Image (cartoon, rainbow, N blue to C red):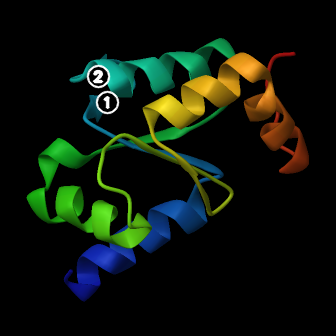
């Protein structure tokens, strides 16, 4: 992975409390898994930044190397990699996602 790609990923994660590396944008997701996580975050009314990996092939590959996770979307909360769609969906359904948001002092709709 190029250093500039690594820097871009690091800066996005450092500058945004919640980062969703996704296919498409929060308003126009381009895959069902990206849409699912985006919708969960919208339901919780958390402020998050969606980063469209489809705009940059280097970023698309780079985020997989960065997290050592093979799939997209990928969710980061306060610099911590949380997981992909299946993990986030399970956390959302069993209440772990809201616990994580509370632990990290992130405002969300209760």
- Does the rendering let one see residue 49? yes
Residue 28 in the image, given as x and y percentages of width and height: 28, 19
Q: Is residue 91 above or below residue 84?
A: above
Which of the 4 quarters of the picture holds residue 25?
top left
Of residues 5 and 37, the one drawn nearer to the viewer in this rendering:
37
Callout 1 environment at 10 Å: few (<14), some (14 to 19), or many (20+)? many
Quadrant occupied by the C terminus: top right
Q: Residue at x 56, y 24 (%)?
A: 89
Q: Is residue 10 above or below residue 81?
A: below
The local secondary structure at tag 2 comes to strand
Instruction: Judge from the rendering whether residue 43 lies leftward or rightward of residue 22; answer left or right.
Output: right
Callout 2 environment at 10 Å: few (<14), some (14 to 19), or many (20+)? some
- Does the rendering let one see residue 45? no
Instruction: Judge from the rendering whether residue 95 lies leftward or rightward of residue 86; answer left or right.
Output: right
Q: Residue at x 48, y 30 (%)?
A: 86
Q: Residue at x 47, y 70 (%)?
A: 11
Quadrant occupied by the N terminus: bottom left
Residue identified by numbered label 2: 29
Instruction: Judge from the rendering whether residue 88 lies leftward or rightward of residue 62; answer left or right.
Output: right
The local secondary structure at tag 1 comes to strand
Residue 99 in the image, given as x and y percentages of width and height: 86, 36
Q: CA distance from mark 1 to mark 2?
A: 5 Å
Which of the 4 quarters of the picture holds residue 57?
bottom left
Residue identified by numbered label 1: 25
Q: Residue at x 36, y 28 (%)?
A: 34
Q: Is residue 37 above or below residue 32?
A: below
Dots 1, 2 in contact, CB < 8 A: yes
Residue 42 in the image, given as x and y percentages of width and height: 58, 18
Of residues 4 and 31, the one drawn nearer to the viewer in this rendering:
31
Farthest residue toward the left?
Answer: 57
Q: Is residue 17 above or below residue 63?
A: above
Residue 22 in the image, given as x and y percentages of width and height: 33, 39
């Amino acid at each position: 992975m190029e250093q500039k790609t690594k820097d871009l990923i690091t800066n996005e994660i450092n500058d945004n409390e919640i980062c969703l590396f996704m296919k498409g944008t929060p308003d126009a997701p381009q895959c069902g898994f990206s849409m699912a996580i985006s919708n969960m975050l919208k339901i919780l009314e958390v402020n998050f930044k969606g980063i469209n990996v489809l705009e940059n092939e280097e970023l698309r590959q780079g985020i997989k190397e960065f997290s050592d996770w093979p799939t997209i979307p990928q969710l980061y909360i306060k610099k911590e990699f949380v997981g992909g769609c299946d993990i986030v969906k399970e956390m959302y359904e069993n209440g772990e996602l809201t616990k994580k948001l509370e632990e990290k002092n992130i405002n969300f709709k209760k």
